[in-house]
Amino acid sequence: MRLRPFGRTGWQVSEIGFGCWGLGGGWGSRDDEEGRRAIRRALELGVNFFDTAYVYGNGHSEKVLGETLRDWRGQVYVATKVPSKTMEWPPPPSTPAERAFPASWIVRCAETSLKRLGRERIDLLQFHVWLDAWLASQEWRTAIDLLKKQGKIRSFGISVNDHQPESVLKLVASGGLDSVQVIYNVFDQTPEKRLFPLCQEHGVAVIVRVPFDEGSLTGSLTPETRFQRGDWRAGYFRGERLAETCRRVEPLKKLLTPAVPTLAELALRFVLSHPAVSTVIPGMRKVSNVERNCAVSDGAALDARTLAELKKHSWPRNFYQGVWD
Ligand SMILES: NC(=O)c1ccc[n+]([C@@H]2O[C@H](COP(=O)([O-])OP(=O)(O)OC[C@H]3O[C@@H](n4cnc5c(N)ncnc54)[C@H](OP(=O)(O)O)[C@@H]3O)[C@@H](O)[C@H]2O)c1
């Protein structure tokens, strides 16, 4: 597993990280034992960065991750997220910072996450949503400073609102954070325009989420796919969305070669080809996916021709709209 610097923190993180949303539930049937095996296999293969959240399965993801990491003696970085107190994804632009992230709420959520994870400190605490209008507020800063002073968190980041990479630019430019987590994949390439260069300029780490567009970019979905009961993607890919997405995935198969034989590999290599990226966190619940994704960390970048071809497949849209209302 290859390591990359995590912004200014001095950490060296695995370029393949572990997205833990699915461990909490909401993706159809849940199998905690398989989830634990997947985490253990990832650790064996050199993964040292794990991303979870307070809200994933009401804390179940944090618990499963924490229990499984307990016996691991190697270096591990655990990132979790505090939701907005208003539980809006994202909050309307008029929401005051004091309502979304009151200091007492941030501290209470961080302390709850710490207990669930069973760790001494949280390596990276992220806000699960962000509006740059909150930059001037002292309320959230007070809580972050306090948690750092108490040794409960080591660093602070933002998980950027879905498909809104420019909603965090002012905070990045202010130097007031350690990392951003953002959607970046073959379909949504917009972070390349302004967010990535700004992060590079200010030494802010970049965590890439949703590298597979919630599964479509692995090629495993077809227009006939029916999602299991309890799989939130029935909403994400509702109506014509699934068929349209599959139509957009199909031509990508022409870019596969003996060196890059699968769409999942192409999707991960696309993300890792950008130098601003510190780590990519595919959602994983199975040992087989962990093994396939970790194997991509071999330093073989996509060639310029393939990258230029992939540029043409950019497809900005927001399928999350309406899913969480
Ligand atoms: N707002 C936020 O902060 C936010 C929002 C979304 C996600 N995230 C974070 O980002 C992580 C990744 O995003 P995501 O899980 O939503 O989407 P994703 O990584 O784009 O896709 C996950 C899907 O890809 C499948 N998969 C993984 N590796 C595969 C492989 N090698 N071959 C075929 N299929 C493969 C998974 O399979 P299975 O179904 O079999 O597991 C799952 O269905 C999350 O786990 C979470 O930590 C954060």
Image (tube, grey):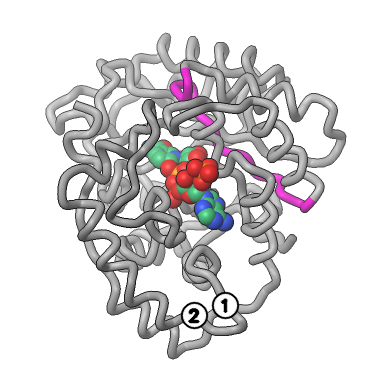
Q: Quadrant of the C terminus?
A: top left
Q: Position of residue 76 (x, y in %)?
A: 74, 39
Quadrant occupied by the N terminus: bottom right
Bin the neighbour count of mark 2 within 10 Å (Cα to Cα): few under 14, some 14-19, many 20 and up. Answer: some
Question: For this view, does 274 lie left or right of residue 114?
Answer: left
Given contact means CB atoms under 8 Å apart, are the residues at marks 1 and 2 in contact? yes
- Residue hosting label 2: 256
Residue at left 45%, top 64%?
Answer: 201
Q: Is residue 223 visible?
A: yes
Q: Which residues are magenta?
A: 45-57
| Mark 1 element type | loop
Q: Residue at x 30, y 51 (%)?
A: 224
Q: Is residue 178 visible?
A: no
Residue type (three-letter) at the residue carrying disc 2: Leu
Q: Amino acid at mark 1?
A: Val
Q: What's the residue at 38%, 54% (across, down)? A: 221
- Vertical order, 314 against 139 (above or below): below
The picture quadrant where one finds residue 185 is bottom left
CA neighbours of label 1 inside 10 A, class few (<14), some (14 to 19), many (20+): some
| Residue located beneath label 1 in the image | 260
- Residue at 41%, 61% in the rendered image: 217
